[in-house]
Amino acid sequence: MDGGARVADVLAAQGTRFLFTLCGGHISPILVAAKARGIRVVDTRHEATAVFAADGVARLTGRPGVAAVTAGPGVTNTVTAIANARLAQSPLVLIGGAAPTVLRGRGALQDIDQSGVLEPLVKRAVRVRRVRDIVPALETAFRECQAGVPGPVFVELPVDVLYEEQVVRSWYGLAATPRSVAGRLVHSYLRLRVHELFSGASPDPGGRIEPAAPGPQPRRVAEAIRRLEAAQRPLLLVGSQALLSPQTTGTLVAALERIGAPVYLSGMARGVLGVRHPLQIRHGRREALRQADAVMLVGVPADFRLDYGRHIPGRATLLAANRDSATLRLNRTPDVAIRADPTLALAAMADQWAQDGSRWADWLADLRERDTERDLEIRAMSEQPSEGIHPIRLCQTVAEHLPPHTVVIGDGGDFVATAAQVVRPDGPLRWLDPGAFGTLGVGAGFAIAAALVHPENPVWVLFGDGAVGYSLIEFDTFARHNLAIKAVVGNDAAWSQIARDQIAMLQDDVATSLAPTPYDQAVTALGGIGFGVSEETELGPALAELVTTARPTLVNVDIGRTSFRQGSVSL
């Protein structure tokens, strides 16, 4: 049995349904063996897309996503996607091919220190040197990527541990013994090295690895309850880490409702409470935080999105639940820090909750009134003149046309940030965006993951015209794999999030201008369907077509430039 078959055996034992890849001779045995075991092999047009797709599977299922890429540039092309997965705390296994063990460091094709490149970005990097080590190494990877604070793990598999022994022997010319003394010495050395590669029994894979999520300390839970129950104006901020185990989403919702405090949702937590839940507040978070006397960060770091904790007043009681001890105290030391899975921590609090959330009714009503006022302001802004279709109006029309249970993916800067204030996912795990790394290019990979994990749900990607450049070629992937992914491009022919402030501060638009490219025509050439929209009267019919088509489809919409998000540069 070749090493590729051992890899596939582990993937099958771990319940891996999809293997994302871009082919290469170093990893061919893995792909062939995975297909033979019923694992769907999905080949993309860029290695980063393969890793983004594996990341998307991890976010949507809570189980490790898996990608396999070839050696050298195949591995280095994944760096951005791996960094994005690490910051998003996604459990992910990246398998990388590598140069032959015997030829390492001797100028072999695509031979670089791959582990050295990825070690700063992964939880662990494992280099396999013998066939019998493949199963233990991969099982270690599946365990490590899920344990504690999840994240990606890299496993390097040299090409000569993946092919059958006879093939490897032929590569090293071991069929015949040379006549010269030097030749015989080299022959003996190579024969010994190949023997080491294949010696020893390869263990069979064990059962599925599912480390338990870390639970909270009762003493910390009791103290958090005491502090929160004493508050007059509490706020709960729930973030992506609370969704690391999607199967506990119902537990999270029940805990939020039992406690009854106003809730802000961010990242992967968007949509957890549906569209119009009475506890959810959507706008004015900074002002609300200034007034709050108690704030609980539920899987939310005090990073740049909270101005490094400065949005939370020093007089307010700060509570935090997070799996990561460093993140718990990042920039602000909480009055109560619960190192645990955020959902388990909140559920433990709800189990002992004695107060009636109705005592915060006035505070909640005030926040909801501000929400309504802000929605009216946004609607008024959408009616202001614009050279193209107003981006807010486009987002409103998209929201009106979204079918129920649509998974919405945001890939862009200015346009997607506008959409985040208008488009409301109607349930949990129906909004995916890059996260804290702010990575453009996630759209195609996340869309592939969503379409595979939830084939019963529509998948829509909202692209900025800058971001779509990273994903456009993947419409070929969508078409080849029969994935009816839909996309809307807000096209203002600029990197607007940068241009707006760059021009104001530096009086120069250098490198921020794009062409009004008809991306819909490119999609048609790649096997999909494309629609171009330049007038608002065309928008509704085009989006209606988007709903009904059974092929990958893109609507390219000419939008105007506005000052809606003036001063939006983040540091």
Image (cartoon, grey):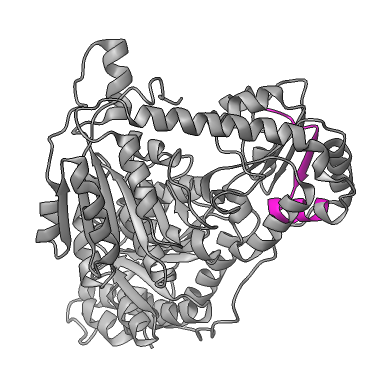
- In the image, what residue occupies the spot 12% across and 41% down? 517
| 458 or 448, nearer to the observer | 458
| 542 or 510, nearer to the observer | 542
Left or right: residue 130 versus residue 308 is left
- Residue 315, quarter of the rendered image: top right
- Residue 445, quarter of the rendered image: bottom left
- In the image, what residue occupies the spot 38% across and 71% down? 19
- In the image, what residue occupies the spot 32% across and 76% down? 31
Q: Is residue 339 magenta?
A: yes
Is residue 149 visible to us here?
A: no
Image coords of residue 54 (percent x, y): 41, 62
Image coords of residue 387 (percent x, y): 19, 28
| 404 or 195, nearer to the observer | 404
| 430 or 41, nearer to the observer | 430
Left or right: residue 185 versus residue 315 is left
- Compared to residue 139, the image places residue 145 above or below, namely above
Residue range highlighted in magenta: 332-349
Left or right: residue 479 versus residue 269 is left
- Compared to residue 198, the image places residue 416 above or below, namely above
Image coords of residue 307 (percent x, y): 57, 25
Q: Is residue 472 magenta?
A: no
- Compared to residue 26, the image places residue 410 above or below, namely above
- Residue 446, quarter of the rendered image: bottom left
Image coords of residue 263 (percent x, y): 66, 42
Is residue 522 visible to us here?
A: yes
